[in-house]
Image (tube, helix red, strand yellow):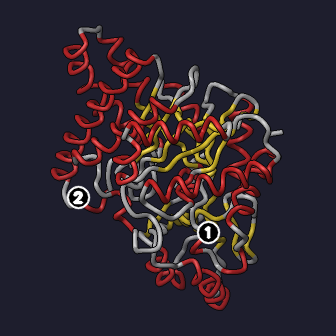
Amino acid sequence: MKLNNFHLSYCSNIHPGESWDATFKNLKTYIPEVRKRLKVTEAFGIGLRLSNEASLILKEPEKLKEFKAWLNSENAYVFTLNGFPYGDFHRQVVKEKVHFPDWTTDDRKDYTIRSFQILAELLPEDIDGGISTSPISYRHWFKTQKELEQAMETATQNLLDVVVELATLEKEKGKLLHLDIEPEPDGILENSDEMIWLFTDWLIPRGIPFLCDRFGISVMAAEEMIKRHIQVCYDVCHFAIVYEDPEETFSKFHTVGIQVGKIQISAALKVLIPESLEAKLEIIQKLQPFAESTYLHQVVGRDQNQALTSYSDLPEAIEKLPETKDEEWRIHFHVPIFLEDYGALASTQSSIKVVLNQILENSHITNHLEVETYTWEVLPEDTKLTLGESISRELAWVIENMS
């Protein structure tokens, strides 16, 4: 939906189901319900999650035609895709496999290009379209600096191949499309500095000669092409976990000319660590329901000297909690954004409010907003609502805080 010139939706990765039939069924079930709950009368924007399997089916002309007809009948439109999870994302152990296949593979590149070809067909005129994606790979898969550099070499070329495809699609269809890379804890790209490093050390030095040769364009035009078609997905939860200040991060990106293609509105779980062992043991009891087996829940702690300590998953962090010197933990668990606290636990909801204020004051940052709370199935029972109510309440909270 349109909100203060922003396109706002929720990410449909909240719905289980990898096939196109399951994806379409969920959209037909929940889009009308959410629209009705929110009393939306204008065109309703959709943040579509397509698995690789679903993309292979939707690419078929008859399936695309059917979907476009449904969008028209519902007065709905697709403006962004979540292309991060390639395969199964629900009701099984996902963990670090969410990164597989990564950007060192043709499978990831081909899936992403196919998804852009679909988005180019679905995207309304005069709207830019983006697809969010993995932060290259899972960093712990690479044991040496040489392995990491080899991965970056291959990944960079695959990303540049996507730039070629998006530049070609823009020329043919007149639609601006951008790949929105999503830093997250334990990805090769975790924060704003590493995102900038991707551009300064890899994409630009390797991309300029490649694109100059490919298109016969100038050095300046080649750099502009890279920054036009590769942007950032700013997941508020992820950047909050690594303790980044949104205003400083947006300023850094703006200074070096990196654009934010999409903001994913999400909140992390936050814990203030008490000093006494007895109180720490009580915190452990509160955290246990969140230490579930489906997703990775990385933890970043900060001590009184502002030093950060990373834990690869919540169960590992819990084991070390009695002896930790950290004063605060932020946990990669996408808790509902409309809740600020969970009894003894809290959330990074305040970071969302800062981000929303920033984009209202600086409309150049981005116009794509997508609520991404996908952990409803694994939340503790006392925080659960019906799915339609949950989605609507998240969006209503955003609307209220942007009004």
The residue positioned 55% from the left and 57% from the top of the image is 25
In terms of depth relative to the viewer, which is nearer, 86 or 35?
Answer: 35
Give the quadrant of the N terminus: top right
Which residue is drawn at the image coordinates 64% and 80% (left, top)?
Answer: 275
Whole-percent x, y for residue 299 in the image:
50, 67
Left or right: 144 as drawn, with respect to 323:
left
Residue that appears at 70% across and 61% down: 388
Nearer-the-camera pick, 188 or 79: 79
Amino acid type shown at disc 2: Phe
For the C terminus, the quadrant is top right
Q: Quick check: 79 left or right of 132?
A: right
- Residue linked to disc 1: 376
Are circles 2 and 1 on residues that touch, CB within 8 Å?
no
Q: Is residue 249 visible?
A: no
Q: Is residue 74 left or right of residue 191?
A: right
Residue type at tag 1:
Trp
Q: Which residue is mark 2?
A: 142
